[in-house]
Image (tube, helix red, strand yellow):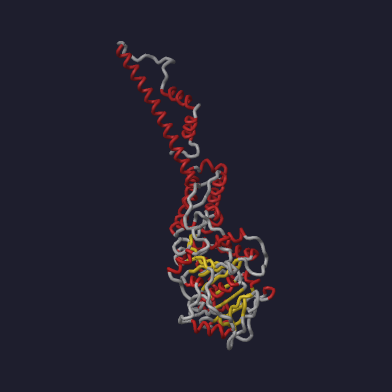
Amino acid sequence: MTDGAIFVGGAGEGYAEAREMLLRYANRHGLVAGATGTGKTVTLQSLVEGLSAAGVPVFVADVKGDVSGLSRPGDPAGKAHEALEARARQIGFQPYAYEGFPCVFWDLFGDKGHPVRATVAEMGPLMLARMLELTEAQEGVLNVAFRIADEQGLALLDLSDLQAMLVWLAGNAREIGTTYGNVAPATVGAIQRALLVLENQGAASFLGEPALRLSDMIAVDADGRGRVNVLMADRLIQAPRLYAMFLLWLLSELFEELPEVGDPDKPVFVFFFDEAHLLFDGASRALVDKVAQVVRLIRSKGVGVYFVTQNPDDVPGVVLGQLGNRIQHALRAYTPREAKALKAAAETFRPNPAFDTETAIREVGTGEAVVSLLEAKGVPAVVSRVLIRPPCSRLGPITEAERAESLRASPVAGVYDTPLDRESAREILSARADKAAGDAALAEKMLADAAAREAAEKEFARARRYESGDPAPRRRTRADPGLAETITKTVVRQLGTRQGQAMVRGILGGLFRGR
């Protein structure tokens, strides 16, 4: 193996010599594809090991639980150890030793790893609009909500904050319409329904505080090995919209926070999208364009993005064209559509006169692949058939006891485990509503008291006339105040007090009309 490269696979009868991924081009992104059972997960595991050993922090989603084995060394007494060691000798992957890697486990739901959270403000209106697939009008209203929240110091931290802000927006649509444009209650309702779908998928667990600090992911251990951040996604993939939102948010945060580095000697961070089709299935054109934009621009920040999926056809062409490093496991063509996809996959490789690429993709067995990696000056290498190197860590998942041990020993243990609920938009708006309701109730009471006094005075006057033998009503003089005058005097007297001013604001509507 050469310095500045990751051993991917190689030699054997009928196979190419050793194939390595140059670290200086690892941020040019990549693709690992192949049918179920052809070895994609083992290839992913081997790539993660190579990057971590080279001091590159990695993020990988574990959708089946298998990737958690990265945290433990392989078993020299296990059933597969003889085959693994034989493969290592065959391809010249020496020295080959079993070892685990510095893994930190994360889980959006907090069940099998440290909770991962982001605030609504960090998500921003543009990304939320893309993920919720809002119309242009709905996106405009969402932008108004964020703008007013900023101007009035209403922190949007969790999902309930945004929902409360939208309720306020609908209740004050007439007042804010002259400044920010029309805000139709029906539009607000449509946004609320879209948020409800996201909430039902578990977004309330993700949106909140304490928010994730990227520095807790982009780190190395005491031995200089890159931290392996494993997102436990076996439950998360059942909520595809939330899964896509989290992955896109993380990429966007990396792009915004990391400085420009061009093409460094090795990546700053490498990001693996497992089950990539979940990100794109049913995605709107706007969302696909957003993903393509982030993937295209994030390379200059030293971040590599690798998509792991069953078929290259799962990744839109606008994204696929940016993936320079390709590892293609076997594809099966049982239908005309699959045959077309296989042919298209073969045509994306730089041809090798020694064999037919399409035939090779059909024929490679488990643990074998058709590979094209970037060479000097970022040029794709001629396609080769290789035997993929065996992993040094455990094949398969860890036990629950081992997971608990890893969480206790984690460098971020206790940092994110307890949710934080500080005063934000929901609490502030609720307090304002309570105050407005109190002001309105006080105003009603004062009006009722004034009316009661007017009625009492009339009854007293009637009784006096009866006692004096003059039952006929006399004409009211200027000294006899009527109900309207009584109320007016009462309100005027109160205007000089803080309580009176608050009452009048309540009567006129203030920030909240009625109760």
In the displayed structure, 95 sits above or below 474; it is below
Is residue 345 left or right of 3 when viewed as pictured?
left
Is residue 218 left or right of 232 when viewed as pictured?
right
Residue located 47% across and 63% down the image: 408
Residue located 67% across and 69% down the image: 265
Name, please, the residue furthest toward the bottom.
13
Q: Quadrant of the C terminus?
A: top left
Residue 493, how many percent across, how many down?
47, 24
Is residue 253 left or right of 160 when viewed as pictured?
right
Residue 66, how many percent across, how many down?
47, 72
Residue 420, how many percent across, how many down?
48, 52
In the displayed structure, 283 sits above or below 445; it is below
Residue 380 image-quadrant placement: bottom right
Residue located 58% across and 64% down the image: 219
Residue 270 appears in the picture as rendered = no
In the displayed structure, 400 sits above or below 82; it is above
